Image: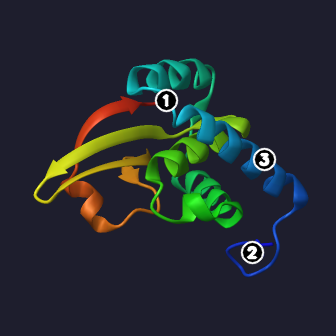
Amino acid sequence: MRQVLDTDGSRPPLGRRLAAHTAVAAARLLARLPPRRIRAVLRVAHRGAAPADYARALRARQDVTAVSTLCSGRYCLQRSLATALLCRLGGAWPTWCTGVRTSPFAAHAWVEAEGRPVGEPEDTATYRTLLTVPPR
């Protein structure tokens, strides 16, 4: 079993771990849908949520990557969906984004808060955004 640690090296509370597992499971199902359906589901999910601040979105991303080896690796779609859903469980919503770049070709999904990508490498700026679900 994987050891789940908080940013300060301590084990996060059980409630946060359970919420992260729930978000990861829901994201796994959502990631199998076509982009049009994903966007439709996320538009319903974000209703009534306040915009997520950067710190909250980063903590959600860290919790998601701590409980899921898939999300901590290459599976950016599932990671971004789980991060957004975990924020929503806490009453907030980041901007969920997907995009592509051409040289070299790659697709990527991520979340943004306060106008910047959350926990992403600097090359995320090289992606042309195709779909977003921002907070209202």
| Residue 47 coordinates in the image, percent (x, y) | 59, 19
SS assignment at label 3: helix
Residue 114 visible within the image: no
Q: Residue furthest front?
A: 32
Q: CA distance from mark 3 to mark 1?
A: 21 Å
Horizontal relation, residue 97 to residue 64: left or right: left
Which one is in front, 85 or 79? Answer: 79
Disc 1 crowd, CA 10 A, few/some/many (<14, 14-19, 20+) = some
Question: Of marks 2 and 1, which one's residue comes earlier in the chain?
Answer: 2
Horizontal relation, residue 2 to residue 60: left or right: right
Q: Quadrant of residue 95?
A: top left
Amino acid type of the residue that numbered disc 1 sits on in the rendered structure: Pro
State the residue position of label 2: 5
| Residue 98 coordinates in the image, percent (x, y) | 34, 40
Amino acid type of the residue that numbered disc 3 sits on in the rendered structure: Ala
Disc sitting over residue 135 in the figure:
1
> What residue is at 43 percent from the left and 31 percent from the top?
134
